[in-house]
Amino acid sequence: MIIKSAEFIISAVSAKQYPEEGLPEIALAGRSNVGKSSLINKIINRKNLARTSSQPGKTQTLNYYKINEEFYFVDLPGYGFAKVSKELRNKWAEFIEDYLSKREVLQGVIHIIDVRHPPTGEDCMMYDWLTHFKLPTLVVATKADKISRGQWQKHIKEIKVKMKLPASQQLVLFSKETGQGLPEITKWIEDVKKD
Ligand code: GDP
């Protein structure tokens, strides 16, 4: 994918603020700090367009990035921030569920997991939602550079088992440091935004 332009459009706090011109959207979901912004920045080849999070869980916004005047990346608010109140957590769930279930231009979701750690209950819940809403999903296991190559398969297997991924589910191992996995991820985006 050749990136001709990439611009930040809006941090939307409600559905009223979502762009209206009908361009396809690819959303990114994952725990706070898992590396969503880093993946966006890597794909668009910028150091810092997508903000790398400072206060995870505090701001519940959908961040829209317009790519090549052709589609949007939508950075969903991260989950799994321990200090967030139950009330805020419920609001988060409602906001995301609404977006995932009702947004007609949503073409697919990149679900990012930290390859170093077993997936959490919230990781599993998010994947269940994506399956439930029948959204084309790419699972990306990130931070591959942080564990040794010999550990990769063991960790990937644990992710597959814990999240009950069907054999048909595509999973890509990624690292923002080495760029491994990037070609598969951009290929998936190219395919899914056409559907
Ligand atoms: P977000 O909250 O999901 O947007 O996460 P960020 O993109 O802000 O990443 C959180 C932290 O993880 C930052 O310090 C990143 O530099 C680091 N990080 C993200 N991806 C990788 C990766 O592939 N390898 C390594 N070593 N660090 C990463």
Image: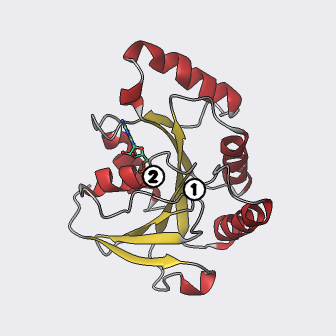
| Distance from the alpha carbon under mark 2 to that under mark 1 | 9 Å
- Left or right of 155: which side holds 87? right
Q: Is mark 1 within 8 Å of ligand 1?
A: yes
Question: Looking at the picture, does residue 106 appear above or below residue 129?
Answer: below
CB under 8 Å between callouts 2 and 1?
yes
Q: Quadrant of the N terminus?
A: bottom left
Say which of 98 and 21 sits in front. 98
> In the image as oriented, which residue stretches furthest toward the top?
150
Say which of 136 and 34 sits in front. 34
- Please count the marks in the image: 2
Q: Is mark 2 within 8 Å of ligand 1?
A: yes
Which numbered circle lies on residue 147? none
Percent of width and height locating residue 37: 41, 55
Q: Mark 2 sits on what residue?
A: 36
Question: Looking at the picture, does residue 22 appear above or below residue 109?
Answer: below
Give residue 178's quadrant in the image: top left
Residue shown at 39% from the left, 70% from the top: 65
Q: Mark 1 sits on what residue?
A: 78
Percent of width and height locating residue 119: 64, 34
Count residues near mark 1 (Cα–Cα under 10 Å), then give few for <14, some for 14-19, many for 20+: many
The kind of residue tagged 2 is Lys
Q: Secondary structure at mark 2?
A: helix
Q: Which badge, 2 or 1, is on the more N-terminal residue?
A: 2
Q: Secondary structure at mark 1?
A: loop
Percent of width and height locating residue 142: 44, 37
Residue shown at 32% from the left, 55% from the top: 41
> In the image as oriented, which residue stretches furthest toward the front?
83
